[in-house]
Amino acid sequence: MKGFGVLRTERARLTGLYGTLLLLAGGGLVALVYVLVGQGLYTSVSGAVSTVSPALRRGEVPPPDPGRSPEPARTVAPGEQPPGPDLKDLKAYGFTHTLSDAVTEAMQRRLLTVSLVALAVFAVLSIWLAWWMAGRVLRPLAVITATARRLSGENLHERIALDAPPGELKELADTFDAMLGRMEHLVSAQRRFAANAAHELRTPLAVQRAAAEIGLAGDPPPERVARIRAKLIGVADSSEHLIESLLLLAVSEEGPQSGRPAERVDVAALAAAELEACPHQGLTVERTLAPLTVTGDRTLLGHLVRNLLGNAVRHNRAGGRLGVATTADGELVVSNTGPLIDPVDVPMLLEPFRRRAERQHTAGEGAGLGLSIVASIARAHGAELVARANPAPDGGLTVSVRFRPAEPRRAESGR
């Protein structure tokens, strides 16, 4: 059974293919040589034998006398034998013809035997060469397969790094390396997300436990009970908001819901409505809302705009500025003033649970998921998100989301 398994491998198939092609080429070459040599062989042998005929060497057929003049034509008398070839000449010719046939037949048999032996040797060499060639061609695939079998969640940092000339297999190995890089990034992000989520959820639980065990120990006065009660409610609200954000992040990673058809969404109107509902007292609002319609999930796009505005208000400063703009070419821009941000730290702010400073667990602080949810929803809608730090003295952040504008509605039939 193991032998049959070897015959089913790609190397065996390529060996059969290459060996058959080489064998057909060798057989065709041998047949061509045999036919071409056999066609002119008799003429060559006959001419060679005639020049060295034994009858001529023994003097049985006298050579012509160069000084003898040819006899004139004459009438043959009755009973006289007409002039013609001598009997010795006929014998020499017959001997030469027989010898030529024998030599030609012997040479053809010899040529056929040698050709068959050469073809057999060539067949063996062809199979060996085809097996070696197939192994040489499939060696990169063996490296890729071995690497894929060896990889796990603990060694995703390994790469094939195939050392080979440019070609299809080199491109395959490089593509596999790029895929491993993306997988490593996703697994690292997932592990970091799980660790941060566990930390974020464990902290409010610890606060609730401490408030219940310490603050309510013994017989506390009503004022302390009211204060602890308000603290527990605030921590519960924060935990509820965190869980809702985690669920929203998971939904946004999946993209628009498959059961809900994509619809045309007026992002400018959506931004205007969310801006009215967003508490931005004390901030100078600059709005430039040009018509912008995209195709997507209205609920997710609403969360995208709401999180952008909430992040811009939460991290603003007193008397600062909030800018909201949409453009006809498919761009939504939200900017705000605030603390100066190092441009190197901007990509970090788009990851879950990443903040510029450690969390203080105060009211309205947020869970650090706002911009990561925005980035996830943008990816789900095929949009490009770009965040950049604003220079001094304004500070703050500018986030732009470039959508693919929705195609214009098709004219109704009959109009």
Image (cartoon, grey):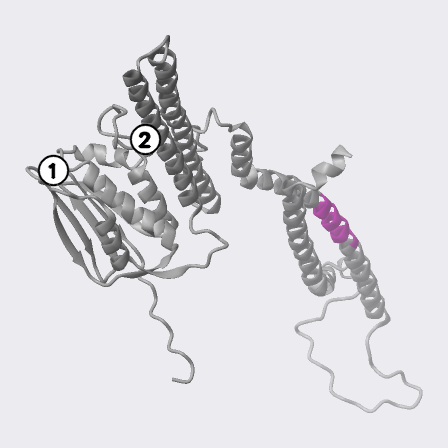
Task: Look at the image and say whether residue 117 sits in the magenta stretch.
Answer: yes
Q: Which residue was labeled with disc 1?
A: 395
Nearest the camera: 408 or 55? Answer: 408
User: Callout 2, which amino acid?
Assistant: Phe
Compared to 236, does 122 lie above or below?
A: below
At a point 7% along the width and 37% down the height, the residue shown is: 392
Q: Which mark is residue 353?
A: 2
Q: Which span of residues is magenta-colored?
A: 109-120
Image spot of residue 290 (x, y percent): 20, 61
Image spot of residue 122 (x, y percent): 67, 45
Nearest the camera: 101 or 386? Answer: 386
Total labels drawn: 2
User: Callout 1, which amino acid?
Assistant: Gly
**CA separation in Å, label 2 and label 1:** 22 Å
At a point 31% along the width and 23% down the height, the residue shown is: 231
Image spot of residue 374 (x, y percent): 31, 44
